[in-house]
Image: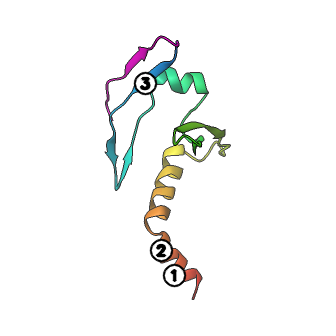
Amino acid sequence: MNGVVKVTKDQSKVKRYSRKIGRMGNSLGVSLPKALADKMNISQGDEIEFIENERGEVVFRKSRAALLNEQIRPEVLEAFFDVFEEDQGILEDLRDR
């Protein structure tokens, strides 16, 4: 996803990042600007969580760093999780037999 990052600062000195949503397989996805990923210390394979507050605003934060064996490539693990998510119903059916 090659998106243009629009960063604006309002009068309260809050940075706002604007991104377009793109298709990632059967899902929707948003890429993070490098400056924001660096600031949050996020890299490929890390997990983030989305939190909805009482005002209906959604914020995200890094939940934990992924510790992978150095022989496992992050893109292979990501593909595994995509397949698992896609076939979760089939796997649950097999488990229940």
The residue drawn where x is 46% and y is 53% is: 79
Cα–Cα span, label 3 and label 2 = 36 Å
Q: Say whether residue 19 is left or right of residue 36.
A: left
Give the number of the disc on residue 17. Answer: 3
- The disc, 3 or 2, on the residue closer to the chain's N-terminal end is 3
Question: Spatial distance from mark 3 to mark 1, Cα to Cα?
Answer: 42 Å
Magenta span includes 97: no
Q: What SS does tag 3 mark?
A: strand
Judging from the image, what secondary structure is the residue with disc 1 in?
helix
User: In the drawing, what numbered circle is on residue 89?
Assistant: 2
Query: Mark 3–mark 1 contact, CB under 8 Å?
Result: no
- Per the image, the residue denoted by label 1 is 93
Disc 1 from disc 2: Cα separation:
6 Å
Residue 87 % position (x, y):
45, 69
Q: Which residues are magenta?
A: 1-12
The residue under the point 53% across, 51% down is 77
